[in-house]
Image (cartoon, rainbow, N blue to C red):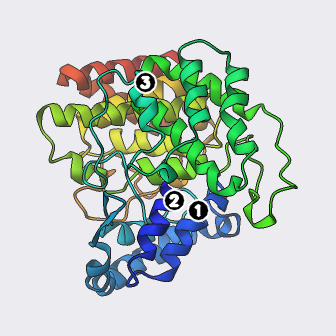
Amino acid sequence: MPRSKALHRLVSRDQRLPTYLSKAATTRASLPTRGSPPFTRPFTPLFSHLFTPIFSHLFTPIFTPLFNPIFSSRFTVDGTRFTLDRTRFTLDCTRCHHPFLSSRRSSATLNPASAHTMQKPEPPQDVMADDWFAYKLAPDGDVEDGCHPDEAQALKDYLRRKTTAPDAARAITRPLVTCDDPREDLVRLWALLMDAFVELPSEHMERLIALVAAIEALPEPDFRAVDADKQPQEKLWKGLAGFGHLWADSYQSGSWRAFASNLVGEERKAYGDEHIQKAQAEARLIAAGLAGIEIDWAYEAVADALESSNALLDMEIPAAAQWLQHCGQRLRQGAAKGEKSWALEPRISNASCTPSRDLWEARSDGVMNGKRWETWQERLRTLQGEGGRVGEAAKRGLQAMEAVGV
């Protein structure tokens, strides 16, 4: 579903929200995907180590009471309930390299994968059944929020091995290439692919990766006949323009740990399974060099899992194992050359749902190095003794690290 469009409609209905939130939601797809905004990169250390603590401790007590009544509001849009996360304002302003916008995630994030943010219908028991594809045509009962029927059919035929990846890539993109408003309709295609990565059984992951690669290999369409205000603002296929932003805005809510920590039993397992599958999809896209996603996502996920005493072990350790299995070689290379990453910078928050990163001695250091690599290995050796899902995942992660070098 067009989640950025839904957010824009949501924000527009509540006049109390700041105008810049609505603008951020509608201009999200035009922001660069890779790294921090270019004009802020030289100032990253300054913002991170000087201004961040000042703003965090000085302005949080002032702005939190002011914005809580705004950001805790709940809305219903087209039968779907949304909750704006009141903690995101504070957390994002202390983590972004830019005071209002982060190139990785938006100040207002919808997390449709989380039950506390969006109500989802029960999926069909066989997610490869026709019902799954039919549901994607109108996810909330509104066809405006669904994909094009030809996109759903193209994906169905491909996953049922009736077509090749190149043929499927041409078929699934044809509705967008021939539509009247490609800028508006692009999010529909991206949302369909995102849902396939997260909701379909993981044995389809390999074919989905091949499909994305085939889409990136397509020639760029000619939209000169389309009105200028409806033309995409950047190339569509190479790097999947806007895909990484939409993924982050949909699936990487800053409050997911607070929600997940309260789950028990089968509900917790199901939520954890989805979290792990999302990690696998992200890791495999990065390993294949697709979707314009940077290695920073891997650094963040693994560091949060292995450097934090408050990590949700049953979810974050299996997810970290996925990252290490698919991106271990790339992470090891980063350690060898002392790669810097915003994702390795310390957390400036005392919130219990924020990864503490307290198990890493150089907490002010945003660098990947050999010492950090060894700390991760030692942590996994310790966690092997946990047994069950955590112990098995720790073993897989450790094996992946050892396979690419000490």
104 vs 25: above or below: above
- Residue tagged by mark 3? 130
Going by the numbered disc 1, the residue's amino acid type is: Arg
Residue lying furthest left in this view?
265
218 vs 184: above or below: above
Left or right, 249 with reference to 354: right
Task: Report x, y in % for residue 228.
Answer: 81, 65
- Residue tagged by mark 2? 4
65 vs 164: above or below: below
The residue that appears at 28% across and 83% down in the rendered structure is 61
| Circles 1, 3 touching at the beta carbon (< 8 Å) | no
Residue 175 vs residue 44, the one in the foreground: 175
Which circle's residue, 1 or 2, is located before the other in the chain? Answer: 2
Nearer the viewer's eye, disc 1 or disc 2?
2
Q: CA distance from mark 3 to mark 2?
A: 27 Å
Q: Secondary structure at mark 1?
A: helix
The residue that appears at 64% across and 49% down in the rendered structure is 186
- Residue tagged by mark 1? 28
Left or right, 182 with reference to 130: right
Residue 284 occupies quadrant: top right
171 vs 302: above or below: above
Left or right, 64 with reference to 36: left
| Circles 1, 2 touching at the beta carbon (< 8 Å) | yes
Q: Secondary structure at mark 2?
A: helix
Can you see residue 406?
no
Which circle's residue, 3 or 2, is located before the other in the chain? Answer: 2
| Circles 3, 2 touching at the beta carbon (< 8 Å) | no
Going by the numbered disc 2, the residue's amino acid type is: Ser
